[in-house]
Amino acid sequence: MFEEKTVLTGIKPTGTPHLGNLVGAIKPVIDMSNEAEKSYIFIADLHALNAVRDSDLIKKWTNEVAATFLALGLDTKKAVFFRQSDVSEIYKLTVMLMNVTSKGLMNRSHAYKAVSAENVENGNAPDAGINMGLYTYPILMAADILLYNTDVVPVGQDQKQHVEMARDIAGSFNHTYNDEVLVVPEPVIPKATSAIPGLDGRKMSKSYENHIPIFAEPKKLKKSIMRIVTDSKRPEDPKDPDDSTIYQLYQHFAPKDKADEMRKQFTSGGLGYGDAKKMLFEMIDTSIEESRSKYYELLAHPEKIDEVLEDGAKRAQAVAVETVNKVSKAMLGKII
Ligand code: ADP
Ligand code: TRP
């Protein structure tokens, strides 16, 4: 699907990656980059700024996200893997694109509208706590996408509108300056993997504090898994696997025959939740064991992570400079 295309995606460093992120975002991005002709994967640290006010946390989470991708085998010779803030052309392009972006377009952004609606619901002023980073988030994201001549942006449903805004902004620039300088990107929503449930059965999310970190130490991993909320069915009772967090998680890590086996045992009765949790722990633990050692090894040597990201930034910058040159020539009649 991505052959002969330039694909790009960004991941915000807003927490320690969890199993939901792994299955819903990190694995699909690694697969996509193996398929694509050219891929750009970056850690969107500038996008985290509107919410995270602690530089130590941004650095910690950036390193954790980077180490996760590297430990899981992202091929960084092929994929251009970098930190958003390391390519200074992003600042230039963002400022220039502001001038071909209508305020009305920003007013329609779901991300900003959601916060505003919540404010009103809580009896606060609509703009309470909303900074311009959040309000203009889609312009920075458009600059990310347009800087690298991106054809395709694989994103979750929640980010589709932002990619459509990047299309609008590119179209507006090309129209205003009578030129086809910017490549108009397309969003692709990877086939829906249903949301991974968390410890309490709701969608696994940092905001619900029901998540399991991907590389939790075995003891902690086991403890988390044993805390998964279940109903009061006895071992011999038949259970609906599709309604069970344990099975939902298990099927993402187990080979098909093992997953089918648990499914059968649940349906027919005879497998208790305690035993099923132990099976789940063993399965996740063995499948991530090797990556987990690499992950901690990398975090213990952040200079190794920096080296990879800096190499990626150099390769990204070579392309970014060309885009900024073309845009500034069109807008200012000179190269900036
Ligand atoms: P969180 O909800 O923990 O804050 P994010 O919103 O930062 O997670 O999500 C980052 C990426 O991980 C997104 O692409 C999102 O679709 C994916 N993701 C997050 N939680 C899940 C989940 N429970 N199941 C599947 N994918 C998920
Ligand atoms: N906004 C995206 C998110 O919240 C992260 C992101 C930043 C991104 N820039 C991007 C995604 C460019 C795709 C393309 O998940």
Image (cartoon, grey):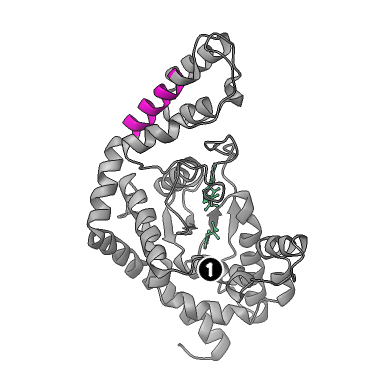
Is 333 contained in the magenta span? Answer: no
Split into 4 quadrants, where in the image is the C terminus? bottom left
Give the main secondary structure of the magenta stretch. Answer: helix
What amino acid does circle 1 point to? Leu
Residue at 43% x, 18% y is 275
Image quadrant in which you'd find residue 116: bottom right
Q: Residue at x 31, y 46 (%)?
A: 71
Q: How many marks?
A: 1
**Residue 246 against residue 267 in the figure, above or below:** below
Specify whether 184 is left or right of 273.
Answer: right
Residue 271's x, y, as percent? Answer: 49, 13
Q: What stretch is highlighted in magenta?
A: 275-287
Residue 224, x across and y down, in percent: 43, 35
**In the image, is 202 to the left or to the right of 279?**
right
Magenta residue check for 283:
yes
Pinpoint residue 172: horizontal percent, then vertical percent.
67, 74
Tell me the SS state at disc 1. Answer: helix
Badge 1 is on which residue? 146
The location of residue 93, given as percent across then percent down, is 52, 78
Q: Which of these two is toward me, 102 or 262?
A: 262
Q: Is residue 48 left or right of residue 157?
A: left
Of 300 and 102, nearer the camera is 300
Q: Which residue is drawn at 25% across and 42% down?
A: 293
Q: In this view, does 200 lie above or below 64?
A: above
